[in-house]
């Protein structure tokens, strides 16, 4: 793999001089810094007004305070870590990316968000702009190297600030920078987050399109108008919009559907073929915490009198396919293990997804082979049936038309839906409804005619 910088010792440039910045990374960095070593976001916002407002709205700034992350850590991960030696490292490790200031300060476990500590800053401005490189050959598990202080890491040369020095460090513009937290290997040695690794194999990577080109695009503006900053044509917008941004989701998965014939008779057989494409993302859909995210294809036919028929997908016969066709199967029994609930039956595996719909997923399996949303408890995987970059999949729906279907035009609608969390898990753990409210990613209609 191509490395952006020398790793244990990072190379940065200040005023034309080469500066070597060494440090520790990953688990070894626990407790090596103090909260006071990092500026607060409020200080950064005094000059970087627009960038600060953008950052406040994205999930980077809410990586610790976001309700699902809070509940997952305090109700599942933390008690599991304190009881089971195999996963003990996640007590601190989760915070390496979700509350990095707390991790670096050794404030483990942090107090809950309601206590208002600096852990609440999540992935803060100064945290990212203090990262000088990463340790090892592959960025993962918060193996970034930080050097907080007067020097702030950036990518632009020839600029000055009245508040701090600026180091031109190309690492901040690299995909590896993102990979330090968007790749994760769990205690079982499984890549439970691999967004950067997925990107490496993508057409986007081959074309030189990196993570920040999509998630932090350039626009004309002024990054520090309150301190006399200059206008530029290529200011990085700190949007970091992704799975929690409806605009980012819409159109990411496209769908088109067509019938095998344009005319049919009641009682005859017809096949509808839906083509689903990952048209936009430079990684799999879903990616990141794929164990908890649900993407599915739903097809409904409506006859000329308004009678609707839900069409189940045709099975393809590959190993483990049952994980990818929605049913009333129960899963997530390890929640009972973690919470020490006797005879916990599990929860509905597919939540709100209608039975028979195709699910694009990578099943995460616990040590007993049961589906889990506890990524740290993932020992193996089921089939990877996600949508990879610019990949198209054909799904067929064989239908014997009912004998009483109305004559006239039949409208068939294919929809691709996305939910950030399995609805049954959200309901059980008391997660806000917005986490499970389906978002429509793609839709298409086709028609055929039933003769009288």
Image: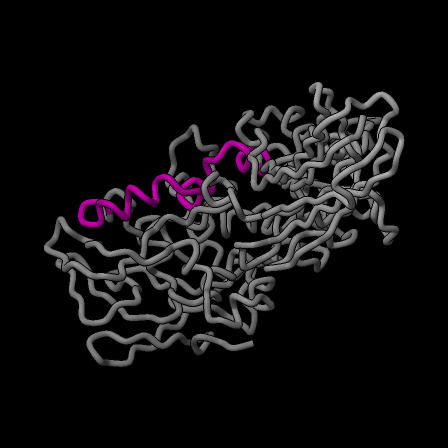
Among all residues in the image, which is located at the extreme front? Answer: 452
Among all residues in the image, which is located at the extreme left? Answer: 228
The type of colouring in the image is one colour
Q: Assess whether residue 48 is covered by the magenta stretch.
A: yes
In the rendered view, tell whether residue 308 sits above or below residue 377. above
Q: Assess whether residue 357 is covered by the magenta stretch.
A: no
Residue beneath the point at 55% across and 35% down:
439
Image coordinates for residue 407, horizontal then vertical, percent: 77, 24
Is residue 324 among what the camera can see? no
Residue beneath the point at 66% across and 39% down:
446
Query: In the figure, is residue 435 to the left or right of 446?
Result: left
Q: Nearer the viewer, residue 116 or 277?
A: 277
Among all residues in the image, which is located at the extreme bottom? Answer: 17
> Which image quarter holds the N terminus?
bottom right
Image coordinates for residue 82, horizontal then vertical, percent: 65, 41
Is residue 154 among what the camera can see? yes
- Quadrant location of residue 335? top right
Image coordinates for residue 4, horizontal then vertical, percent: 44, 75
Q: Nearer the viewer, residue 295 or 272?
A: 272
In the rendered view, tell whether residue 178 sits above or below residue 8. above
Image coordinates for residue 157, horizontal then vertical, percent: 23, 71
Query: In the figure, is residue 298 to the left or right of 169?
Result: right
- Quadrant location of residue 11? bottom left
Q: For the magenta stretch, what is the residue range?
A: 45-73
Query: In the figure, is residue 140 to the left or right of 218?
Result: right
Residue beneath the point at 55% across and 62% down:
196
> Which image quarter holds the C terminus?
top right
């Amino acid at each position: 793999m191509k490395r952006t910088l020398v790793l244990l010792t990072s190379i940065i440039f200040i005023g034309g001089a080469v500066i070597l910045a060494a440090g520790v990374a990953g688990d070894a960095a626990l407790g090596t810094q103090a909260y006071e070593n990092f500026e607060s976001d409020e200080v950064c916002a005094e000059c970087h007004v627009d960038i600060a407002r953008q950052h406040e709205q994205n999930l980077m700034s809410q990586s610790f305070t976001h309700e699902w992350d809070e509940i997952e850590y305090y109700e599942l991960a933390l008690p599991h870590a304190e009881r089971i030696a195999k996963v003990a490292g996640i007590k601190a490790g989760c915070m390496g990316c979700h509350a990095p200031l707390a991790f670096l300060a050794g404030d483990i476990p942090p107090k809950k968000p309601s206590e208002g500590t600096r852990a609440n800053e999540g992935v803060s401005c100064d945290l990212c702009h203090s990262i000088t490189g990463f340790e090892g050959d592959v960025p993962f598990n918060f193996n970034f190297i930080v050097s907080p202080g007067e020097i702030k890491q950036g990518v632009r040369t020839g600029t000055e600030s009245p508040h701090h020095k600026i180091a031109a460090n190309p690492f901040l513009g690299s995909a590896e920078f993102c990979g330090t937290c968007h790749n994760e290997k769990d205690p079982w040695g499984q890549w439970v987050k691999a967004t950067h690794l997925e990107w490496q194999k993508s057409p986007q990577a081959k074309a030189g399109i990196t993570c920040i080109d999509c998630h932090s695009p350039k626009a004309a503006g002024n990054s520090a108008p309150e301190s006399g900053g200059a206008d530029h044509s290529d200011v990085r917008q700190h949007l970091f919009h992704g799975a929690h941004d409806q605009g980012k989701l819409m159109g990411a998965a496209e769908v088109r559907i067509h019938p095998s014939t344009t005319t049919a008779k009641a009682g005859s057989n017809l096949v509808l073929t839906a083509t689903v494409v990952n048209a936009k993302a430079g990684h799999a859909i879903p990616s990141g915490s794929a164990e908890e995210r649900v993407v599915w294809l739903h097809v409904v036919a409506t006859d000329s009198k308004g009678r609707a028929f839900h069409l189940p997908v045709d099975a393809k016969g590959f190993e483990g396919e049952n994980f990818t066709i929605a049913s009333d199967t129960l899963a997530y029994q390890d929640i009972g293990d973690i919470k020490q609930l006797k005879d916990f039956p599990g929860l509905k595996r597919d939540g709100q997804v209608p039975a028979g719909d195709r699910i694009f997923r990578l099943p995460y399996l616990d040590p007993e082979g049961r589906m889990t949303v506890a990524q740290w408890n993932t020992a193996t995987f089921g089939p990877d049936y996600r949508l990879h970059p610019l990949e198209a999949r054909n799904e067929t729906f064989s239908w014997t038309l009912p004998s009483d279907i109305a004559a006239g035009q039949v409208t068939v609608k294919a929809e691709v839906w996305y939910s950030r969390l399995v609805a049954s898990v959200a309901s059980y753990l008391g997660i806000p409804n917005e986490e499970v409210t389906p978002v429509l990613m793609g839709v298409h209609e086709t028609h055929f005619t039933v003769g009288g």
